[in-house]
Amino acid sequence: MEESSNHATDSAAPIRVGLIGVTGYAHSYLGELKKLVEKGWLAWGAVTIINPDDASEQIEYFKSLNIPIFDDYRDMLEKEDGNLDWICVPTAISWHTAMTLDSLKRGIPVLLEKPIASTLQEVTIIQEAEKASGQSVAIGYQYYYCPKTAEIKQCFLAGEIGEIERIDCLCLWPRDDDYYHRNDWAGCVHDGHGWVLDSPLHNALSHLVNLILYFAGPAMDERADLLDVTAELYRAKSIQNYDTIRCETRLNTGALATMLLSHSTTNRLDPEIRIQGTKGSLVWRFGGPHTLHTEEGAVDIEAESPLEVRSYMFDKIVRGLRGDKSVSYCTTELAKGEVKWVNAVQDAASVHEIPLEYRRQRKNDKGETLEVVDKLDDYAVQAFEKQCSFKALGVPWAVEPGYLDLTNYTDFQARHLKEYQSASVAK
């Protein structure tokens, strides 16, 4: 990671960190940062907490250490100017751009939680600010930082499965009402502040998008790019955006990549990515083991535990900040591909509401009430195995997939989101 002379890089000096947010997903950031503070690699600089009623325990912790607490991140940056070496931003998607820009303007490197932003326009703005500041923006795609991810990519680059021909991904993660009411932007297209485009593709499972593009990339530090996209977007929940998607894209490396994701099934099926090459294949599994099939036979690659992957990310990024030049991190350019994919599917197809006659309420084994679609579990597995669309499978509520050629596609256009056009697409 790049460093500036006015920030701590000496291996003996702890890095002074500022954290924006301590509840929700940010609570996991707090936990990882605490470990590194205890290790002596970090020191608390300041924290922003906008919801004190929900964070009494965290406030007590920071007060016990005499750490400055702010209710606005801008005040924190202004009043602690010169006292912060690193900013962590695990916040609402629509705030990512502003918080990153404000940090970079003060010469502070950033860890920005995935996804980097909601639109390609915002990514461009972040990248321009990153370049101008001379500081780095690392993106929180935690699986990128895992040793096994690098090992798998090296296998591909060594030609162990030949040329990658197609990549297919399936994940069914049911989500209940609490998931969509945990904040004021879950499931939203726009939250009143900015574009969100929250969906399975752009939030909970965006790691998979990032991994697919990275695995298909022509070099260790490069990702593949999208040439076009075909998409079906469906909604069964009471939300603005889609909760189920089946899409495919041709990549500039010659491979075809497909994704089938849903939050509206009855049962959970953890992520699986099948990568088919001309001489073999690899199956990536959430939590592993991954399985590599080559001409010499099948080999299991034991994966990191899902509970470990975030720790790998923080460890690598902080080692980079402390001067380890061998550390690589998920750059804004690597993360940009996910945003292009997300923007492209929303510009390729409108969201189709699944008729009520096909929707039911079910209770899972935890007693949570789920809005589900009849037989969606079976339809999804069949579409995945047969490598076809819901429409081609003959699903009764399915619609023809939308298509978009991505030649010269550089900006999100909100083609099918006219009701939100009053919010500037270029904002």
Image (cartoon, helix red, strand yellow):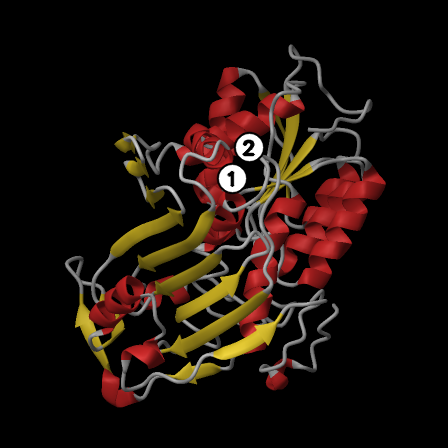
Q: Residue furthest top?
A: 12
- Pointer 2 local density, CA inside 10 Å: few below 14, some 14–19, many at least 20: few
Q: Which image quadrant is residue 375 in?
A: bottom left
Looking at numbered disc 2 in the image, what kind of residue is underneath it?
Lys
Between residues 43 and 412, which one lies in front from this camera angle?
A: 412
Q: What residue sits 55% from the left and 26% below the top?
A: 316
Looking at numbered disc 1 in the image, what kind of residue is underneath it?
Ile
SS under mark 1: helix
| Quadrant that contains the N terminus | top right
Q: Which residue was labeled with disc 2?
A: 63
Is 76 situated above or below 382? above
Q: In the image, 170: left or right of 149?
A: left
Q: What residue sits 33% from the left and 79% below the top?
A: 392
User: Looking at the image, can residue 265 be seen?
Assistant: no
Question: What label does residue 155 carry, if any?
Answer: none
Q: Which residue was labeled with disc 1?
A: 59
Asked if the residue under mark 1 is in contact with the one under mark 2, i.e. CB atoms within 8 Å, the reply is yes
Q: Residue furthest right?
A: 132
Point out residue 44 in the picture as x, y percentages from the top left corner: 60, 28
Point out residue 291 in the picture as x, y percentages from the top left corner: 29, 38
Is 246 situated above or below 65? below
Marks 2 and 1, how far apart at CA = 6 Å
Point out residue 378 in the picture as x, y percentages from the top left corner: 20, 69
Between residues 380 and 180, which one lies in front from this camera angle?
A: 380
| Quadrant that contains the C terminus | bottom right
Is 23 situated above or below 406? above
Point out residue 129 in the picture as x, y percentages from the top left corner: 80, 47
User: Looking at the image, can residue 180 be seen?
Assistant: yes
Q: What residue sits 44% from the left and 75% below the top?
A: 233
Q: Which image quadrant is residue 86 in?
A: top right
